[in-house]
Image (spheres, rainbow, N blue to C red):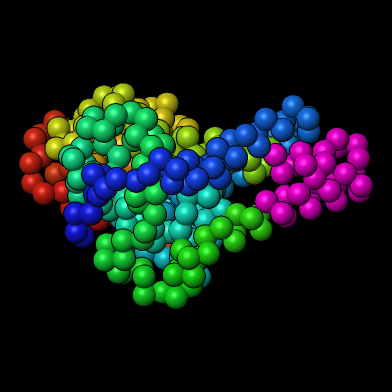
Amino acid sequence: MEGQGNTDVHVPMWKVVVSSLPFLAVHAACVAVLWVGWSWLALAVCAASYAIRVFAVTAGYHRYFSHRSFKTSRPVQFLFALLGTTAVQKGPLWWSALHRHHHRYADTEEDIHPPTVKGFWWAHVGWILSPKYEATRWKAIRDFARFPELRWLNRYHLVPPVTFAALLFLLGKGLEYAAPSIGTSGWQLLVWGFFVSTVLSWHVTFCVNSLAHVFGWRRFETRDTSRNSFWLALLTLGEGWHNNHHRFPGSERQGFFWWEVDLTHYGLKLMEWAGLVWDLRRPPAWVYQRGSWNFEPAPEM
Ligand SMILES: [Zn+2]
Ligand SMILES: [Zn+2]
């Protein structure tokens, strides 16, 4: 992995505005809840859409593609990538390559989104809106780049979310006629199930880059500023144990103790029980040596 921060590259303001428009438009679309109204079904679809897509990002994009913390078959690997793309966080190879870079250079000038160096808003959304980081860093993700189906998803990462949004609209439209007593519609399921759910999942994911390096407590004296937060762990399905994660990124579980709620870990345990994933990596005994200073180089993955 090369240092490719490029934060000093000058990007014209008009380019930043143009590249931010789709992101802002998805936020603006949420205002449509005022016109489409709500129903219990729409809220349930919103919650399910959030949970499934955040799980695909945390278990798939993060714990599998970025850190290889468990093993799975090629079809399930594809499924993780496919569901991950529906979260509209670009392709799995782009995401994971950048994330590996974050671990290597966490909280240094070279890091892409260090709140301690470049400010909270840059860490939260600035780096995403900037066109500086659009390219996939192929050298950092050679291991998964050899799969053509993943390269396809990485390139056409907007196809699955647009298809997903269209299916939600058709589902709502169908129910509007087939079961009018539910009180839903095509537009309602589209707005709640896709737009509101996407914006919520975006900001919760971004909080791991911004808040999880600023607020919370530190069990391990890692070389970075990562922190643990129970509330963020709840919202992110387990990613809030970020100090644990920086201490040993290769662990499949990020809650290192039974009381550290980690919903992604529970989901992966269920998948392991069903034979869909295996070889879930645990934190080794030395990792539990609380508060010990950790100056050795961070693991590669
Ligand atoms: Zn981090
Ligand atoms: Zn990570």
Identify the residue shown where x is 42% and y is 65%. 72
Q: Of 255 and 78, which appears nearest the observer?
A: 78
Residue 198 horizontal/vertical position (percent) = 57, 41
Inspect this view and state whether residue 119 appears: yes
> Left or right: where does residue 209 sit relative to residue 44?
left
Q: Of 64 and 33, which appears nearest the observer?
A: 33
The kind of secondary structure the magenta stretch mainly shows is: helix
The correct choice, above or below, for 193 with respect to 156 in the image is above
Inspect this view and state whether residue 238 appears: no
The correct choice, above or below, for 141 with respect to 33 in the image is below
Q: Which residues are magenta?
A: 165-191
Identify the residue shown where x is 20% and y is 37%. 107
Q: Of 141 and 30, which appears nearest the observer?
A: 30
Identify the residue shown where x is 71% and y is 44%. 190
The correct choice, above or below, for 77 with respect to 259 in the image is below
Q: Quadrant of the N terminus?
A: bottom left
Q: Of 227 and 289, which appears nearest the observer?
A: 227
